[in-house]
Amino acid sequence: MGMPRLRQAYTPHPVVDQSPAHLRAYIDGNDAISGRPFMQEVLDGLTGLLDEADLQGLSFERTTPRLVEPGTEDNLQRLFEANAWTDMLPIVLPTEARVEAMLKGTSHPPDKIVGRLRPTVFREFWEFTVEKVAVNAVMAGARPEYFPVILALAASGITARSSSTTSFATIPVINGPIRIELGMNTGIGVMGPYNHPNATIGRAYGLLSQNLQGGSVPNETYMGSQGNWYAYTSLIPEAEERSPWQPLHVQKGFKPTDSVASVFFGGWYTHAGYGPRATWQEKMRHALAAVEQYSPPFFVMDPIVARGFVDLGYDTKEKLIAWLADNALLTAREYWDNQSIQLLRPKAVAGIEPYASRLKANPDDVITIYEPSDIHIVVAGGETQGAWKMISGALRATVNIDAWR
């Protein structure tokens, strides 16, 4: 996992919803890998003297050949599949000529470092260059003019191939003039496979993530129990021209003329609805109560829905977001009875708000589970139906695309 001499002790999964006695047996029993008593493995790992292998540090070869041996197209496709370099769909083979053409989509040199990625927080970051991103952009079928968007996503530092057992996905939102320049779809089928830049930019982000972070191989470097369909080509350009509200990037302090990629990390759940109908408040409350509370929602609303909320007095996103935050309610018992939310408990114990107040609440007290800053709204859709989707997603990064032209 990037640190071959890291001393580890292993307990089986899952740990969620197991009885205390079952979990205690992991600790009192033997390490599932070594067969030695688990706690002895822990003590030896913490106190044992460094040996020769420890002192050598990293022992695996980080460098990779720039080129693979030539072969037939069929054999090369199988080679990429066998090495898990693809998303298991056919790719455009990244020949030198094709990569060189892709590099013309940016003014940055091929050897410039774009950023670093890792699939999960306990693994080491891998650093990568403009040329390596170009290879993956070619594989995805992208065109050179799309390349600045792909570079911006690569530079975000947020992987599109998270290895969380919870099967997270990453969903980018694109704002600014580049949507129009590239002919991106903000209308009918915006979240579907109906537009070339939408689909190939999203796919390139996924491919570069798995290839430039040290792999994404099930049961080795990818542990998402169920996986996630958002991980294929999820990408949403906002319909700024048809929205009655400020676009997302302007809300975050960018100018309307800036082209910006915003990266949401989640994709854990999706709720859907129509409206705003007469019972929209009840519908929203039910949907908010059904979320996985560790991952806040962002809403994708058809322009019909946005205009409907304006008619109800919500003339800014911020006003509607404030209502949503006030009405995202659970009992304290339900809130804390969640494996992932336990990751926030140290903040609560340390007195950090709002988590501290949530922890002090009585089990049956009703508490709000999100702050307004946690919730986001994006307007997109083709105005054939007043539909909205509520998707799990915390905003993790915003990157200026223009910097990568």
Image (tube, helix red, strand yellow):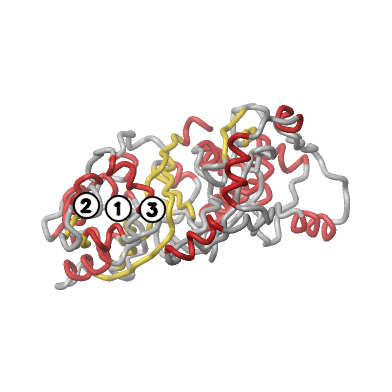
Q: Position of residue 326 (x, y in %)?
A: 16, 55
Q: Within 10 angstroms of label 3, few (less than 14), some, or many (20 or more) residues?
A: many
Q: Position of residue 232 (x, y in %)?
A: 56, 59
> Residues at badges 2 and 1 in contact (C-beta under 8 Å)?
yes
Q: Amino acid at mark 3?
A: Gly
Give the residue at x 48% y 61%: 23
Q: CA distance from mark 2 to mark 3?
A: 15 Å
Q: CA distance from mark 1 to mark 3?
A: 11 Å
Q: Amino acid at mark 2?
A: Ile
> In terms of depth relative to the viewer, which is nearer, 405 or 292?
292
Q: Which residue is mark 3?
A: 393
User: Which disc is residue 321 wearing?
Assistant: 2
Give the residue at x 34% y 67%: 271
Q: CA distance from mark 2 to mark 1?
A: 8 Å
Nearer to us: label 1 or label 3: 3
Left or right, 102 with respect to 250, comes to right
Q: Position of residue 57 (x, y in %)?
A: 70, 30
